[in-house]
């Protein structure tokens, strides 16, 4: 006779499997380079014009994290567990999984647009210089150039390849930001606490403050290496999907 086993509310299936896959991927990211396989370089998100880009990376980057420490993985998995379990139990596994990937892929799309905005003008200048040899085209992007400077094209092509191939993004943060928004929408009375401001705040205000902080950190010049606009992109695509489901009457 089959025995009924209820879902463990602390680890519903999608949340549990997401955490397991991310942990295994993190371990593989540390161990496989010893065998000559860099899965972060292979499966992390590259700029779409890079020779290293593959469309599959729009999904696979979500399961990879920084290998220099465990904090990136830990805090993302803690957030997915803390907030995702409630949403999965509310929506069910299938709906939650769709939402997760829409948020994560949306974050990747926004990150690609950010890279295009920041990189494309310099790439276009290099391409135009190859045709015209007008050094003025490169002056906004390269220091210590004069009107009489001549740059070998081999060096410029190397620079162009570096600009295209160097940017890479990994992590589940974009999907997590979508989860945070969904939590605020579904459980608006829930109270959340900021580490540096230990006063309970209702979830919608908490998420709004967090989004404002991400926007601020994304706009100001910074070298923290964090894809702040990708986080907001995950939240943006999550908002669109929530509004779509609400319009269809199947959000709650």
Image (cartoon, helix red, strand yellow):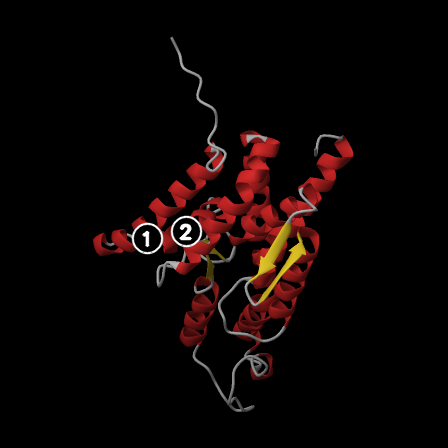
Q: Would residue 250 appear left or right of 55 to someone viewing this image? A: right
Q: Does residue 148 lie above or below 218 as drawn?
A: below
Q: Would residue 34 appear left or right of 222 to someone viewing this image? A: left
Q: Which residue is located at x 60 percent, y 61 percent?
A: 229
Q: Position of residue 237 (x, y in %)?
A: 65, 47
Element type at marker 2?
Answer: loop
Callout 1–callout 2 Cβ contact below 8 Å = yes
Q: Would residue 250 appear left or right of 176 to someone viewing this image? A: right
Q: Residue furthest top?
A: 1
Measure how far apart labels 1 and 2 are at the Cα level. 8 Å
> What numbered label is drawn on residue 79?
none
Element type at marker 1?
Answer: helix
Q: Residue furthest front?
A: 199
Q: Position of residue 223 (x, y in %)?
A: 50, 74
Q: Nearer the viewer, residue 73 or 224?
A: 73
Q: Position of residue 115 (x, y in %)?
A: 56, 63
Quadrant position of the C terminus in the picture: top right
Q: Residues within 10 Å of mark 1 (few under 14, many from 20)?
A: many
Q: Nearer the viewer, residue 91 or 3?
A: 3
**Residue 170 in view in this figure:** no
Q: Which residue is located at x 34 percent, y 45 percent?
A: 24
Q: Residue furthest left?
A: 35
Quadrant position of the N terminus in the picture: top left
> What numbered label is drawn on residue 64?
2
> What numbered label is drawn on residue 29?
1
Q: Does residue 224 lie above or below 81 as drawn?
A: below
**Residue 192 in view in this figure:** yes
Q: Residues within 10 Å of mark 2 (few under 14, many from 20)?
A: many
Q: Position of residue 14 (x, y in %)?
A: 48, 35
Q: Which residue is located at x 67 percent, y 43 percent?
A: 187
């Amino acid at each position: 006779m089959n025995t009924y086993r209820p879902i463990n509310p602390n680890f519903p299936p999608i949340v549990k499997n997401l955490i397991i896959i991310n942990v295994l991927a993190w371990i593989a990211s540390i161990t496989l380079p010893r065998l000559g396989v860099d899965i972060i370089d292979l499966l992390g998100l590259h700029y779409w014009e890079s020779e290293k880009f593959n469309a599959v990376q729009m999904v696979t980057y979500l399961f990879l994290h920084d290998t220099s420490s465990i904090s990136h993985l830990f805090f993302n998995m803690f957030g997915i567990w803390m907030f995702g379990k409630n949403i999965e139990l509310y929506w069910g596994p299938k709906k939650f999984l769709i939402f997760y990937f829409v948020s994560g892929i949306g974050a990747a799309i926004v990150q690609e647009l950010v890279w295009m905005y920041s990189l494309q003008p310099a790439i276009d200048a290099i391409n135009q210089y190859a045709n015209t040899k007008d050094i003025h085209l490169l002056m906004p992007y390269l220091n210590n150039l004069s009107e009489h400077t001549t740059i070998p094209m081999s060096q410029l092509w190397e620079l162009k390849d570096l600009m295209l191939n160097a940017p890479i993004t990994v992590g589940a943060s974009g999907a997590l930001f979508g989860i945070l928004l969904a939590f605020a929408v579904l459980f608006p009375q829930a109270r959340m606490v900021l580490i540096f401001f230990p006063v309970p705040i209702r979830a919608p205000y908490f998420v709004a403050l967090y989004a404002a902080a991400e926007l601020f950190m994304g706009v100001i010049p910074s070298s923290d290496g964090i894809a702040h606009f990708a986080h907001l992109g995950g939240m943006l695509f999550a908002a669109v999907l929530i509004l779509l489901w609400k319009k269809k009457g199947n959000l709650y």
